[in-house]
Image (spheres, rainbow, N blue to C red):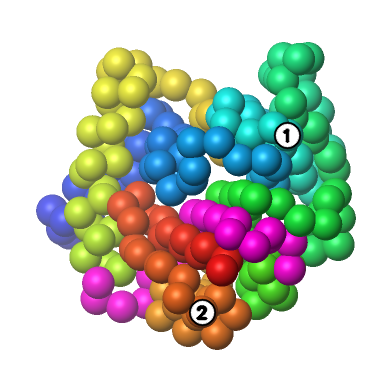
């Protein structure tokens, strides 16, 4: 016989599928709070439909958004005003960074698609002295803390979807329609590898199946 917890979980999954919302965009205000009020140039890795890049353009002299998906990059260009100081390029995050250095680098829900240590090494190399790297990533659940946070997040996820969609079913956000791959690294593994490449990096588990990394280059 189906147990009550299983029925509740299935009901939440069905509700969330009918009321999707952008977990990454939810953290955009938090990302902006980690950054200076004004800075020179910025790089958004895995820029998708360009929402974060356009927000960065409100503080930056210039923003480069790079993404490996030509279709979503074309969509980002369509959504961006012509006079915005933002350029979008179809490029590999490891080999196609447009400029030598940046004052700000952001990377949201992308690094788990890349060789982790190599990607952080590339970001470090392209971050200017005094610059800030902000990364929002996905980790594979593997500890009691991960499962506890996931349990807490499930009903909050449903409530947030209900509020954001005003009780109606909704299509998935543009940034959620691209192909995704589940994370392979656990949070402790991420912390260990990240701090080896980026000493004094601040890493935290976050709600809605995310973690954050902030690193400022001396």
Which x, y percent locates residue 155? 21, 44
In the rendered image, the vertical position of residue 118 relative to residue 22, given as above or below? below
Please state the extent of the stretch shown in magenta in the rendering: 125-145
Which x, y percent locates residue 34? 43, 48
Instruction: Left or right? Give the position of 66 relative to 21.
Output: right
Identify the residue shown where x is 34% and y is 44%.
13
Which x, y percent locates residue 213? 47, 62
Which residue is labeled 1 in the image?
A: 62
Few, some or many residues within 10 Å of mark 2 (<14, 14–19, 20+): few
Disc number placed over residue 199 in the picture, else none? 2
- Comparing 168 with 138, the one in front is 138
- Comparing 83 with 175, the one in front is 83
Identify the residue shown where x is 60% and y is 80%.
197
- Check the image and name the residue furthest to the left: 4
Which x, y percent locates residue 176? 57, 38
Which element is circle 2 on? loop
Identify the residue shown where x is 26% and y is 48%.
154
Instruction: Left or right? Give the position of 37 relative to 11.
Output: right
Within the image, what quadrant is residue 166 found in? top left
In the rendered image, the vertical position of residue 73 relative to residue 154, given as above or below? above
In the rendered image, the vertical position of residue 15 relative to residue 69, given as above or below? above
Would you say residue 131 sits in the magenta stretch?
yes
Few, some or many residues within 10 Å of mark 1 (<14, 14–19, 20+): some
- Comparing 89 with 11, the one in front is 89
Cα separation, mark 1 vs mark 2, equals 28 Å
Instruction: Left or right? Give the position of 12 relative to 34.
Output: left
């Amino acid at each position: 016989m189906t147990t009550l917890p299983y029925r509740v979980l299935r009901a939440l999954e069905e509700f969330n599928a009918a009321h999707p919302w952008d977990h990454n965009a939810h953290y955009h205000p938090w990302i902006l709070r980690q950054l200076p009020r004004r800075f020179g140039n910025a790089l958004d890795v895995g820029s998708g439909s360009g929402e974060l890049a356009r927000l960065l353009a409100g503080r930056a002299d210039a923003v480069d958004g790079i993404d490996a998906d030509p279709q979503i990059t074309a969509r980002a260009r369509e959504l961006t005003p012509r006079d915005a100081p933002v350029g979008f390029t179809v490029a590999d995050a490891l080999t196609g960074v447009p400029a030598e250095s940046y004052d700000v680098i952001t990377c949201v829900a992308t690094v788990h698609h890349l060789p982790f240590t190599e990607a952080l090494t590339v970001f470090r190399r392209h971050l200017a002295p005094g610059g800030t790297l902000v990364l929002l990533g996905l980790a594979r659940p593997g500890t009691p803390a991960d499962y506890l946070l996931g349990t807490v997040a499930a009903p909050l996820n449903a409530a947030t979807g209900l509020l954001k969609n005003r009780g109606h079913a909704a299509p998935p956000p543009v940034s959620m329609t691209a192909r995704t791959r589940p994370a392979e690294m656990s949070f402790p593994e991420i912390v260990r590898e990240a701090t080896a490449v980026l000493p004094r990096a601040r890493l935290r588990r976050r709600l809605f199946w995310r973690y954050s990394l902030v690193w400022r280059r001396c």
